[in-house]
Image: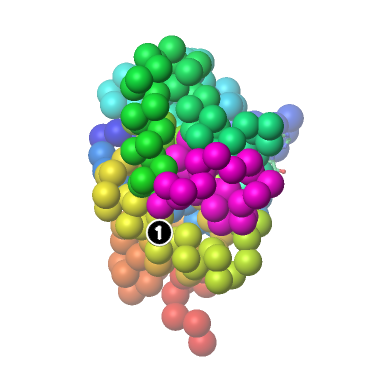
């Protein structure tokens, strides 16, 4: 298992944002966390990233206990809806940034940035600034930057949420292809049922800080465990 979460609890004051959440994600999986607004999806993702400290429970990445590890020690890449690129840096410089922080040699950085530009199909746009890109292109650059240091896990929190429907659709197809190419274990948060059904191998349905059901899109659709999952994922009538 690349990600193993055991009995995670997170409170904000008296509010229970994560209520005994346990979850395993297989290496190379593309898993969607799906649920209504406020169900705890971002809190779970941020806890795995190390941006929130849980009150109890454990988080393992590749069998190592990272529950109390710093963000930089976890080797995770993340992209949020508004996790902006550096405006004063070019596309190439944005992607190079985490590699420079990690003190990789110059030649390696140049080669890796080239590979990543190729991967996101923006070879010709390396010298542009973020303001000269479309919203969809910017999120592709954010993804390349997240992948730069070869993270163990890619964490995406509604990465396409701010974009219009057509662009979102194209990016989903693109993300699925990218995943099939690089096989990085990916956890994507969405409140959009279609998005989850379309791209994920496995869907984790969340509601009120709990996991209601985990399964393939088809199995959740065919055999919802309870009325909530049925209402959220089942046949639309
Ligand atoms: P989701 O991503 O599923 O919409 P979140 O994980 O962001 O849900 O939030 C779950 C609940 O926890 C929400 O009710 C939210 O208001 C609350 N919450 C999240 N972060 C904080 C915080 N930093 N302080 C207080 N409450 C928070
Ligand atoms: Mg959220």
Residue 13, x across and y down, in percent: 73, 30
Q: Is residue 14 left or right of residue 204?
A: right
| Whether residue 49 can be seen here | no
Residue at x 59%, y 43% (from the top left corner): 128
Residue at x 45%, y 40% (from the top left corner): 144
Identify the residue at the far bottom of this view. Answer: 237
- Specify the quadrant that holds the N terminus: top left
Residue at x 68%, y 36% (from the top left corner): 87
Depth check, front residue: 105 or 148? 105
Q: Which residues are magenta?
A: 121-145
Q: Is residue 173 magenta?
A: no
Residue 40, x across and y down, in percent: 59, 44
Residue 174, x across and y down, in percent: 40, 59
Residue 173, x across and y down, in percent: 40, 63
Q: Circle 1 sits in a helix, a strand or a loop, which is it?
A: helix
Q: Is residue 116 above or below residue 75?
A: below
Depth check, front residue: 53 or 129? 129
| Whether residue 177 can be seen here | yes
Depth check, front residue: 22 or 149? 149
Q: Is residue 143 magenta?
A: yes
Q: How many marks?
A: 1
Q: Is residue 185 left or right of residue 77?
A: left
Q: Is residue 209 left or right of residue 185?
A: right
Q: Is residue 14 above or below residue 166?
A: above
Q: Which residue lies under the disc numbered 1?
A: 174
Q: Examine the image and state in which quarter residue 58 appears.
A: top left
């Amino acid at each position: 298992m690349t990600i193993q979460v055991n009995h995670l609890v997170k409170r904000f004051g008296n509010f229970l944002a994560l209520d005994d959440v346990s979850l395993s994600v297989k290496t190379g999986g593309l898993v969607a966390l799906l649920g209504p607004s406020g169900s705890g999806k971002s809190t779970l993702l941020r806890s795995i990233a190390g941006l929130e400290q849980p009150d109890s429970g454990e988080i393992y990445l590749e069998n190592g206990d990272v529950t109390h590890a710093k963000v930089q020690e976890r080797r995770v890449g993340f992209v949020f809806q508004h996790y902006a690129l550096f405006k004063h840096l070019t596309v190439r410089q944005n992607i190079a940034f985490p590699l420079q922080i990690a003190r990789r040699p110059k030649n390696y950085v140049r080669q890796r940035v080239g590979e990543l530009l190729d991967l996101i199909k923006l070879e010709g746009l390396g010298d542009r600034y973020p303001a000269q890109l479309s919203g969809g292109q910017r999120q592709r650059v954010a993804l390349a930057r997240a992948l730069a240091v070869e993270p163990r896990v890619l964490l995406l929190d509604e990465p396409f949420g701010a974009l219009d429907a057509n662009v979102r659709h194209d990016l989903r197809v693109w993300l699925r292809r990218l995943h099939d190419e690089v096989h990085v274990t990916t956890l994507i948060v969405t409140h959009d049922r279609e998005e989850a059904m379309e791209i994920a191998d496995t869907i984790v349905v969340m509601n009120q800080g709990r996991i209601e059901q985990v399964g393939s899109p088809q199995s959740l659709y065919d055999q919802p465990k309870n009325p909530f999952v049925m209402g959220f994922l089942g046949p639309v009538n």
